[in-house]
Structure formats: C-alpha cells, structure tokens
Amino acid sequence: DTTSGPRLKIAMQKSGRLSDDTLSLLQASGVRFNLQSAKLIAHAEGWPIDLLRVRDDDIPGLVMDGVVDLGIVGENVLEEVRLERLQTGSPADYQALRSLDFGHCRLSIATRLEEHGSAALEGRRIATTYPYLLRDWLRREGLNASPVVLTGSVEVAPRAGLADAICDLVSTGATLEANGLREQQVIFRSQAQLIGRPGDLSQGQQATLDRILRRLDGVQQARE
Ligand code: PRT
Ligand code: ZN
C-alpha cells in the first residue's frame, strides 16, 4: 500500500533554468502538481509525493542530510556542495539514480590572455562561483592559482580588474564572447541528475520511487 506511511519528498529548483524541464519530466512520468507559485510545498495529484521548491544550491544538502528523499539538480552544484561538505565534515553521501539529459553545460576556464593552455594560469587570480570544483581541478593539474569567489557577474571580473581569468558555466558560449573572453579549458561537464538520500526508503516510498523510475525510463527511451 503506497497511500499510507511517509510521503516521498522531492526537492527541485523553484525558479530557474532547471524548473521547466524538471516539471515536464515529472509530468511526463505521470506525476502532476497543482503549483501555487508562492508556495514552498506542492502535493502530487493521486501520488503520496510532496514537492519542495527551493534554490538549486540547497538541493544537494537537503538530500545528503536526509531532509528530503529525492532531488533534481545540476551535477555542477551537486559536486561543488559534495566537495565543500567533505572538507567541512558534513554528510556528503547520496545515491545517483538517473542522468536526466537536460541542463547540459560545462564549467570552463576562460581568459583574456593571449597565451594558450593552462600554464598561463600559474600564479593568476581566477574569479568563480565554484571554488571547490576549481581548487580540486587546480590541485589535480598541479597549478598554483587563486580562486576569487563571486556569487554573480563572474564574466565581468577580468574587465573590472578583479581577476585574470574566470571559471564559469558555459552553454552556447555567447556570454564569453560578449565579454571578450576565450574558453581555454573545460574542467567539468554537467547535466541534471536525479539523486536519492543515503539509507533505505520506507517500503511505500520505495514502491513509489520504483513506479517513478519505471515511467521515467519509458519517457527517456521514447525520447531517444
Ligand atoms: O535561484 P537559484 O539559485 O535556484 O538559481 P541559479 O541562478 O543559481 O541557477 P540557474 O537557474 O541560472 O541555473 C541552474 C542550473 O542550470 C545550473 O546550476 C546548471 O546546472 C544549469 N545550466 C545549464 C546553466 C547554464 N546551462 C548556463 N548557461 N546555468 C547557468 N548558465 C549561465 C552561466 O552561468 C553564464 O552566465 O549562462 C551563462 C552562459 O550561457 P551561454 O549560453 O552564454 O554560454
Ligand atoms: Zn543557485
């Protein structure tokens, strides 16, 4: 019986680049919500599912702390939060359930410098919203460069004299071009992912998840 017992809590981005595709995918999987835009929580019609609509940055932590059962989030945010939590000693485990084939982008280093290759980054300042992913890559490459953390407008940092390079998300490349920057190096490739909290779900929750996954796989196959 999937109608009694704890409901399945799913966290998704409230409003942003992932919101429409997330809702479409859930809807195509048969899960419908009556969304009232101001509300944090929505209840699925006919399913024991609650949808929590939050900032995308909060989704990995909610899943890793077991506050919600499932989350749909970009792998860039997921990995950034995981690395941060590993370093600060917070729970950082999750279950990767499905790659969702939307929200594709790459985290890239871009520079105004004419030099090619990563040697040009040695000793430089790199503006980014993703300091943990950037530091991880720099360490693996054996490069010494200093991340400058900005939560927005990263692409103007070189022009503003705040940094020599940037490390930011790219999809079409139009933003880089508009700011006179050239993509030097992809450090991380990302798409939206469905993740689950660590530990076992209740029987009813697991049955609900299995139904969602079966339908989701059907939708993905039909799209191929
Ligand atoms: O409010 P909230 O915190 O929830 O949203 P947000 O503003 O942090 O995120 P949002 O909605 O902008 O992006 C959500 C997720 O979409 C990201 O974490 C990525 O996983 C994914 N995604 C896919 C992108 C892009 N493509 C993308 N192009 N996120 C951001 N961009 C930005 C990029 O930062 C740059 O400013 O778009 C610009 C570059 O795009 P192009 O096409 O000019 O290259
Ligand atoms: Zn965000």
Image: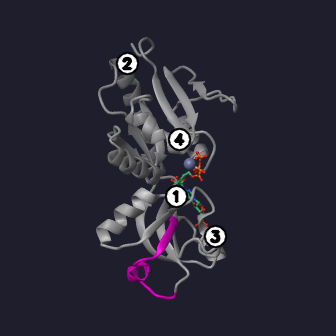
Q: Earlier in the sequence, mark 4 or mark 2?
A: 4
- How far from the left and from the top, in percent, is residue 56? 53, 44
Looking at the image, is 148 positioned above or below residue 15? Answer: below
Disc 4 packing (10 Å; few <14; some 14–19; many ≥20): some
Residue 122 part of the magenta-drawn span? yes
The percent position of residue 81, horizontal first and vertical second, equals 42, 47
Element under disc 2 = helix
Q: Dot 4: what SS?
A: helix
Residue 129, disc: 1
Return the residue at label 3.
156
**CA separation, marks 4 and 3?**
35 Å
Residue drawn 45% across the image and 54% down it: 76
Structural distance between the alpha carbons of marks 1 and 3: 13 Å
Q: Earlier in the sequence, mark 2 or mark 1?
A: 1
- Separation of disc 2 and disc 1 at Cα? 39 Å
Side (left or right) of 89 relative to 176: left
Closer to the N terminus: mark 1 or mark 4?
A: 4
Where residue 206 appears, as percent x and y from the top left, is 35, 25
Per the rendered image, the range of residues in magenta is 114-127
Q: Secondary structure at mark 1?
A: loop
* Residue at image point 39% right, 51% down: 79
Classed neighbour count for the residue bearing mark 2: other residues with Cα under 10 Å, few (<14), some (14–19), many (≥20): some
Q: Which mark is residue 204?
A: 2
* Residue 133 in view in this figure: yes
Colouring scheme applied when the structure was drawn: one colour
Q: Residue beneath label 4, please?
A: 25
Q: Amino acid at mark 2?
A: Gly
Disc 4 + disc 3, Cβ < 8 Å = no
